[in-house]
Image (cartoon, helix red, strand yellow):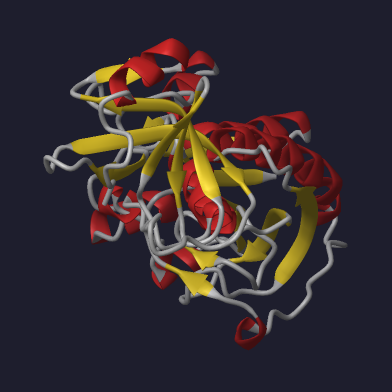
Amino acid sequence: MKVAAFAYHNMGIAGLNALERTGYQIVCIFSYEDDPGENCWFGSVKEWGRERRIPVECPADIGSKKWGERIASLHPEMIFSFYYRHMIREEILRIPPLGAYNLHGSLLPAYRGRCPVNWVLVHGETQTGVTLHHMVRKADAGDIVGRKVVPIAPEDTAFTLYGKLCDAAGILLDELLPLMKIGQAPRIPQDISLGSYFGGRRPEDGRIDWSWTAARIYNLIRAVTDPYPGAFCSLADGSRLMIWWGTPEEGRGCGKTKPPGCVEIEGERVLVRTGRGRLQLVNVQAGGERMTGDGLIRYFKDKEGKLLS
């Protein structure tokens, strides 16, 4: 079975490994150049292909006529997309006679679109998963081949959850790829009106609003902490405070004398008042310096009672 694969990131490698395990012939991989200026905490699809002597192309514009002709010349029977960053145009999707398939990091139709691993944490979901579906013109809207549920632990971050999703993707593909080879895979129509769609996230979306509940702020922190850009707020002097980790403390809303954003020190703990409850600061960064433990106490000792914004 000849296939062309569009792949990137660790999820891309998980998908490629599954194709290899199941005996698919990968005739070409389409990916992206490794950027030395990016925080590349993930594996290189480009190197994966080169180690196996599989051609790897990194086109700047996959939608150009040139690349459509290139893919058609490969005569793939199927196309797979594993976390490829760009939409693949319909003309390319129509090339393989046995269909084009995408692996998405949510339980479709929920969380269609970009950054699903971050969005599910921002919204405090308790489960998510991976879905293999037919690719159509509209993003993440094609018929579903199969899904695998992944529970979200209260302490999960985007990094740990992404690792769980990669593991689940391997299991799901090991179940489905053999069936797809013999034309016996499920095909379940997807009703996108029952789901949700979210766009990409920017570093600026990590700003904390201290009027939110402590639980909501915690969900934002774990959704964007390392290796993502991080959650942040402003100190009284207007400089930025990055909050890489903090833990919520349930409680009532703030009183008149304790507004949201008010810094409190209790023994060896630094806490911030929120709209409901408090957030204990565990790992923060100011002026390029990261602080935990005693470093936090020293830094905030003259800031007790002041407001973060």
Image point (41%, 62%), residue name: 211
Compared across the picture, whether 281 is left or right of 52 comes to left
Q: Position of residue 22 (x, y in %)?
A: 78, 35
Image point (28%, 28%), residue name: 38
Q: Is residue 75 visible?
A: no
Of residues 275 and 190, the one nearer the viewer is 275
The furthest residue to the bottom: 193
Q: Position of residue 119 (x, y in %)?
A: 52, 58
Quarter occupied by residue 302 = top left
Quadrant the N terminus occupies: top right
Compared across the picture, whether 104 is left or right of 198 comes to right
Of residues 181 and 291, the one nearer the viewer is 291
How many tags in the picture? 0
Answer above or below: position of 70 versus 254: above
Answer above or below: position of 115 versus 7: below
Image point (75%, 33%), residue name: 23
Compared across the picture, whether 141 is left or right of 31 comes to right
Q: Is residue 153 visible?
A: yes
Q: Position of residue 9 (x, y in %)?
A: 48, 35
Of residues 186 and 92, the one nearer the viewer is 186
Q: Position of residue 110 (x, y in %)?
A: 63, 70
Answer above or below: position of 12 versus 212: above
Image point (52%, 22%), residue name: 267
The furthest residue to the front: 257
The furthest residue to the left: 237
